[in-house]
Image (cartoon, rainbow, N blue to C red):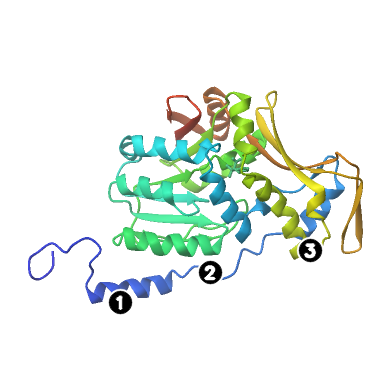
Amino acid sequence: MNRAGRARPPGARNELAVIVDDMRTARQAVPTLEPATSDFPSETIAGLSSSPRTLPCKYFYDERGAALFQKICELPEYYITRTETAILRLHAHEIARCIGARSELIGLGTGAGTKTRILLEELEAPAVYIPIDISNKQLRKSTALFRRLFPGLEILPVCTDYLEPFDLPAPQRNPARKVVYFPGSTIGNFEPDEAINFLRRILALCEKKGALLIGVDLQKDRHVLERAYNDSAGVTAQFNLNLLVRANRDLGADFDLNRWRHRATYNSTAGRIEMYLISETDQVVRIGDREFHFRAGEKIVTEFSYKHTLEGFTALARAAGFDFGKMWTDSKRWFGVFYFTVKL
Ligand code: AVJ
């Protein structure tokens, strides 16, 4: 209520509030530098020297790559984002009840924040929101948006590669519990044993009484999967080939983009989509003083995207120290939003 005794319309704020918020914004400024942990040059050389040859998928997301990924999320064949968002919309109220009041919500790789927004709108009096993202630009944009959408909420963005150890900022209010939100099925990029290790690190982040809300793509018909990663508009191909564009720009490599093609296949034994860049001809690629020889048909592995089952993923989380709480899914059981609590 303002002094006139009328409730202020949502979004309207007095000048003092704006000044205080500006001060807060200044104090909580997002670091301007990209995280220093990125080692694209050495990882590229090492990956191209190994057998099979690999390029790490975390380097997809430069500015162009992030924009291409946004486009992928809107493709008719790419069901993942749409399905996860629909599950959240349907069940946000129940999810919020599981999480409870005055939580500290820690978002890992929350990007533009579309899904987190749905969750925050349902949460009861969250104490603080800590978005963690490797893309500084993305983080600044979403933080500015969320400060407007949730004016009473403390937001403490952290720009870092969450694969590396990092410290959480200290909120002003003491939360009832810490809850990590890891959407998008990014956990699918981890080998199962790596996934357990990563889940252990999440467990350490959220401590006792903590919880994990995580989006996981589920195993399904291979045709659905292969269509999702070989879209007819060729956006995923551009996204994959962007690794070579980036190597050319950032490392002075001389990949000829016309001599590489994208391909994704489902390995049902391993339960994963495998993404490749395939050499169309015998060719030599130079990076600095190194030469890499490729045969026609030779592949570079660029991404594994694991698909899990309810039982399989619950077993991974359990091995990391979590108790299964619930999984919300869609009518086709294509995607799961899992809720785990830290084992007592
Ligand atoms: C961001 C890892 C969830 O595996 O579906 C999309 C990345 N790669 N299309 C996925 C991706 C090709 C995506 N994740």
**On the image, numbered disc 2 is attached to which residue?**
31
**On the image, numbered disc 3 is attached to which residue?**
251
Mark 2 or mark 1: which comes first in sequence?
1
Considering every residue shown, the one lying at the far front of the view is 233
Quadrant assignment, res 198: top right
Q: CA distance from mark 2 to mark 1?
A: 21 Å
* CB within 8 Å, label 2 to label 1: no
Q: CA distance from mark 3 to mark 1?
A: 44 Å
**On the image, numbered disc 1 is attached to which residue?**
19
Viewer-nearest of labels 3 and 1?
3
Residue 297: image x %, image y %? 85, 38
Q: CA distance from mark 2 to mark 3?
A: 25 Å
Which is nearer the eye, 128 or 272?
272
Residue 289 lies, with reference to residue 327, above or below; the image says below
Residue type at numbered disc 2: Pro
Which is nearer the eye, 153 or 252?
252
